[in-house]
Amino acid sequence: MIYKVRTYIPGFDEILYGGIPERNVVLLSGGPGTGKSILGKQFLYNGLKNNENGVFVALEEHPVTVRRSFKNFGWDISKYEEEGKIAIVDAFTGGTGTAAQREKYLVRDLDNIHELLDVVRQAIKDTNAKRVVIDSVSTLYLTKPAMARSIVMSLKRLIAGLGCTAIFVSQISVGERGFGGPGVEHAVDGIVRMDLDEVDGKLYRSIIVWKMRDTKHSLLRHPMQIDQNGIKIEWDKYIRIGINNVKIDNIPQEMIEEINKAMQEVEKYSEYKRSNFQEFEGE
Ligand SMILES: Nc1ncnc2c1ncn2[C@@H]1O[C@H](COP(=O)(O)OP(=O)(O)OP(=O)(O)O)[C@@H](O)[C@H]1O
């Protein structure tokens, strides 16, 4: 049986028929403001609450801003960081500034992929991480697209090799159809795309699972929302976005039943893991 990692993001596990298959590397692709960073942080925070440690590799934001944006949604990671359960890898500052001097996991030279791999390896080992988020992986090859596939493969080999399940954020521009380049799209195990579409003067958020190795998943585009609690996906609805109109309908009844069954199976397995963990903790 393939173990699925629950994201505990409302509606996301349902459209994945249980969660992300363990050790899969998922490319989370989308334009600006679609919610990629929030989803990545929610995945890590929910992991922490469920005894799965994590590593966040910050390439787009200062580590100080990363901590603040977790907090914005009520996800206070400071306790977990003190306990060594989450590590933030600073791949943003290059060591510039006094705040950066205090960072434990610092990548000075982003052109040196080996330095990044070493720091990420150390962070995973120190925290005993099961979840990794790289935000964003596309920053690593923005100026050298020919290197994209080999960079993604090196990261995937390291992270999956250490037993982690990962989200690699991929930034694309507004209106772009792909996910981050052909080399990258085939190298990853899963692709999830988040969208913001303007119809008649209003923006609509949606999410679709494009591929996910080793599991059945929804092939429909689902509406999603962001509020002060983070991301919520309406897994039991699907959205059709036309040029001038938007239609939201319920998904077919048989799909609801199939998803409910998949969720029960994955919950049974999580329950089993939880009780074993408690026994282990109690020893
Ligand atoms: N508390 C909140 N309530 C509602 N929406 C929010 C809230 N906080 C953030 N948002 C929405 O989330 C968006 C930012 O999401 P996020 O930072 O995850 O985007 P992103 O896809 O990572 O974008 P980029 O690629 O530009 O970094 C904001 O533009 C805003 O619309």
Image (spheres, grey):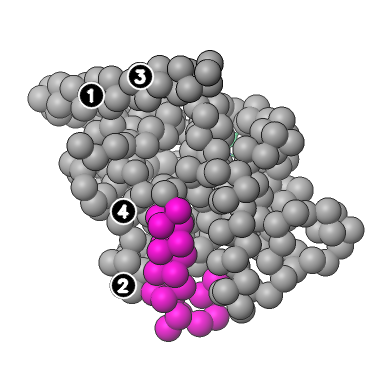
Q: In terms of secondary structure, where does tag 1 sit? A: helix
Amino acid of disc 3: Glu
> Does the rendering let one see residue 217?
no
Kind of residue sitting beneath label 4? Gly
Residue 265's mark?
Answer: 1
C-alpha gap between disc 4 and disc 3: 26 Å
Label 2: which secondary element: helix
Name the residue beneath numbered marker 4.
Answer: 190
**Depth-wise, is mark 3 or mark 2 nearer the camera?**
3
Graded by Cα atoms within 10 Å as few (under 14), some (14 to 19) or many (20 or more), the crowding at tag 3 reads: few
Specify the quadrant of the image occupied by residue 70.
Answer: top right
Specify which label sits upstream in the sequence, 1 or 2: 2
In the displayed structure, 142 sits above or below 179; it is: below
145 left or right of 24?
A: right
**Residue type at tag 1:** Glu
Q: How many marks?
A: 4
The mark found on residue 271 in the picture is 3
Main SS category, magenta section: helix
- The CB of the residue at mark 3 lies under 8 Å from ligand 1: no
Q: Is residue 28 above or below residue 128?
A: below
Mark 1 vs mark 2: give the one in front.
1
Magenta residues, start to end: 140-162
